[in-house]
């Protein structure tokens, strides 16, 4: 069965024309571009004290020592191409409200995979008559601290969103979390914890056909004016003139719509335009495995269908997406298979999104 649904054409086009200016990350240490995840510019005395307490816990974790965790949390990441070989990585942090208050300090540190922080060597004694050269403090591909009032999501978790930037490669991501609402006393201990994830930042600059992450959204909002660097730090899914409001859950009722957006990188260009076809196939999970359910009309992205002003050699980016009502879907678990074909290279890649439809 073939479904013909309106694709997210207007807002996808707005992102195509504006993303190149907005996802302009600088070096892995951060910078002052509009969309760069820049470090905290100024800390109050209280914030410095908060960061200092959490820094000790972060160093302990990076030293390979066990860090008792009072806080239950998880993190999900997305990947976008930025500038000069960089990848912009917005992420969503979800915390169990039973283990943390609504105000937290969050310390983000990205290190090469397997890195262990070693303690400094003790200085030579005065009797030896030698002077040991002090060690330089370690540097990291990315490090930042945030002071956040968490949002309560529909499913009951606390949610925060931030970002970092890095070249392609394998990293360990450490996220330290400290409850800012509790004051440690003889009878009350501060709740904190560190989560560690190995992150494979994909190479979106290899020249081979690839895509960003698939952004499953509740909606896309228009941003009337560009965000400042500080605003961008706390609003990492604001991309150019649009804000992607990421959906909190992939469970849908039959009255909902499945909306998503992604970016296609490195297609072969003919006079600054691609020649790409995107297909969308839905498969339903069954007792025996998986069965084909339906498809939507393929999207053809070429000089014949794209706006004349789109010029990928000038940095404009190619997006695709759909907004699909789920009223015709039965209850169950579905896998959306997205097939992207570069017609000039006769090369295809696939991406998947798994979601669940429940009763209305």
Image (spheres, rainbow, N blue to C red):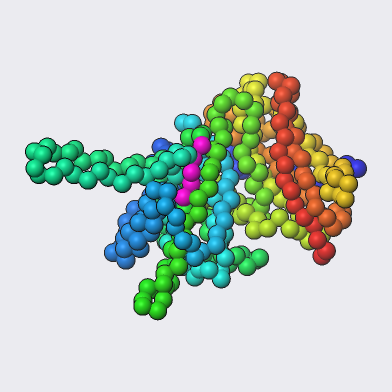
Residue in view at x 26 percent, y 40 percent: 136
**Foreground pick, 99 / 210:** 99
Q: Which quarter of the figure is the C terminus placed in? A: bottom right
Q: Is residue 173 magenta?
A: yes
Q: Is residue 102 left or right of residue 217?
A: left
Q: Does the magenta stretch include residue 40?
A: no
Q: Position of residue 175 (x, y in %)?
A: 47, 53
Quarter location, residue 7 = top right
Q: In this view, does 191 lie to the left or right of 121?
A: right
Range drawn in magenta:
170-174
Whether residue 253 is visible to the viewer of this picture, yes or no, is yes
Residue in view at x 50 percent, y 50 percent: 196
Q: Where is residue 223 in the image (x, y as percent from the top left)?
A: 55, 52
Which secondary structure type mostly characterizes the magenta part of the structure?
strand
Relative to residue 117, is residue 102 depicted above or below?
below
Quarter location, residue 210 = top right
């Amino acid at each position: 069965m073939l479904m013909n649904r309106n694709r997210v054409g207007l807002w996808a086009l707005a992102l195509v024309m504006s993303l190149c200016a907005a996802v302009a990350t600088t070096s892995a240490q951060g910078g002052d571009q509009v969309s760069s995840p820049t470090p905290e510019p100024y800390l109050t005395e209280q914030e410095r004290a908060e960061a200092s307490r959490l820094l000790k816990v972060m160093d302990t974790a990076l030293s390979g020592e066990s860090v008792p965790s009072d806080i239950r949390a998880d993190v999900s990441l997305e990947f976008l191409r930025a500038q000069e070989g960089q990848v912009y990585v917005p992420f969503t942090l979800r915390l169990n409200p039973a283990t943390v208050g609504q105000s937290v300090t969050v310390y983000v540190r990205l290190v090469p995979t397997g890195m262990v922080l070693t303690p400094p060597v003790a200085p030579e004694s005065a009797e030896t008559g030698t002077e040991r050269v002090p060690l330089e403090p370690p540097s990291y591909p990315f490090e930042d601290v945030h002071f956040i009032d968490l949002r309560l999501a529909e499913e009951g978790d606390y949610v925060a969103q931030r970002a970092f930037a890095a070249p392609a490669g394998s990293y360990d991501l450490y996220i330290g979390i400290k409850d800012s609402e509790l004051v440690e006393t003889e009878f009350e201990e501060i709740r904190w914890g560190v989560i560690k994830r190995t992150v494979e930042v994909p190479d979106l600059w290899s020249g081979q056909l690839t895509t960003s992450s698939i952004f499953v959204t509740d909606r896309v909002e228009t941003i009337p004016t560009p965000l400042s660097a500080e605003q961008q730090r706390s609003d990492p899914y604001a991309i150019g003139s649009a804000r992607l409001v990421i959906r909190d859950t992939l469970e849908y009722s039959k009255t909902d719509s499945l909306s998503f957006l992604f970016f296609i990188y490195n297609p072969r260009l003919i006079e600054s335009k691609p020649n790409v076809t995107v297909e969308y196939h839905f498969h339903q999970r069954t007792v025996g495995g998986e069965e084909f359910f339906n498809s939507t009309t393929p999207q053809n992205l070429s000089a014949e269908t794209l706006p004349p002003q789109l010029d990928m050699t000038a940095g404009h980016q190619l997006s695709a997406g759909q907004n699909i009502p789920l009223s015709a879907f039965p209850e169950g678990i579905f896998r959306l298979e997205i097939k992207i074909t570069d017609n000039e290279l006769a090369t295809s890649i696939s991406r998947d999104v798994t979601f669940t439809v429940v009763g209305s």
